[in-house]
Image: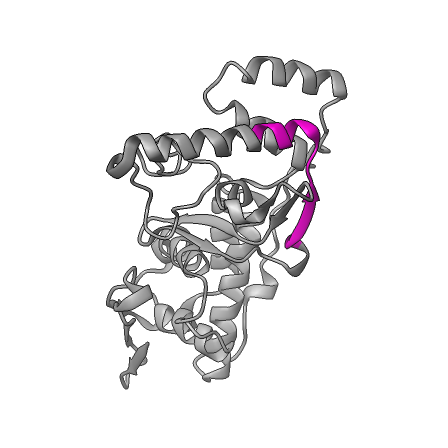
Amino acid sequence: MTVVVESNHTAVIFINSRGSNDWASKITSDIFEHCFWITQIEFGINIKSLFVVVVTLYLRTYEQHIKPHFKGRKIKDIKAENLQHLLNLESKKLSKRTLSWLKVILNRVFNQAYKNEIIKKNPVPLAQFPKYPSEKERRVMTKEEQNIFLKYVRKLYYSDIFEVALSTGMRNGELWGLEWKDVDFEEKVIHVRRTLVYSATKGYYKTSPKTRTSKRDIPMLDNVYTILKTRKERQSELKKFLEDKWKPYSGLENLVFCKDNGIIFSCTSGYKV
């Protein structure tokens, strides 16, 4: 990534669009956007090695929820009351978690401006985080509710996924990214080693789980063992029968959960079901 900073603190940012960074494009910035990008460098983030999904989240949050409020304004003219107005407005349409992420980005941007001596003080801490209604406590299904749920989903095309998810506690991305090499039928264990994510610019790709503890081994219950064993046998038969019509995405040839032609389950918009 190359950053060219001109004398009036505007910046033109180029992100290498070759190789794994083909999702990137040339970006031109005003003083506020300059600080938005420089803060990534100052915090020691190497854009080339950063997960595309994180960069995409930064960009989306900035473009949709921050830039419209401050476009064309000098950062030194943005006061705490302006930030408070932004937070109050965005709290009406964003979740508490997303708004927290938005404020983190704002804080980093203004901290960077302060370090660059563009402003005398970071106003973000002066803006109060809006109050949200108390979140309802999450409730797990009872054994009876689980049985009712399974009774109805077994009639669906996605029944295997629902039952394995319920029986293992695996997250969505972990289920989509599960490969046959992760399934140990002999020891009756599922090894969670990766997750599958989707980016509008990069498509589907595998990455490591978010935390070290996310990499784990899950014992297979008898119903999970039966589902996966049956699914593997059926998938092998389909591969032989379809031959060249079995067309999985490149790098995703050995997914446990996929359509009958080898590609990942998806809807017309391209997002995972």
Q: Is residue 176 left or right of residue 265?
A: right
Choose top left, top right, bottom left or bottom right for residue 128. Answer: bottom right
- The colour mode here is one colour
Q: Residue at x 33, y 65 (%)?
A: 20
Image x and y of residue 92, in percent:
51, 39
Q: Is residue 90 above or below residue 25?
A: above
Name the residue at the right extreme: 143
Please report the bounds of the magenta region as a residue range. 214-227
Q: Is residue 82 left or right of residue 187?
A: left
User: Which quadrant of the figure contains the C terminus?
Assistant: top left
Q: Is residue 78 left or right of residue 240?
A: right
Image x and y of residue 3, in percent:
31, 79
Does residue 104 belong to the magenta stretch? no
- Visible in this render: residue 273? no
Nearest the viewer among 251 and 86 is: 251
Q: Residue at x 54, y 55 (%)?
A: 101
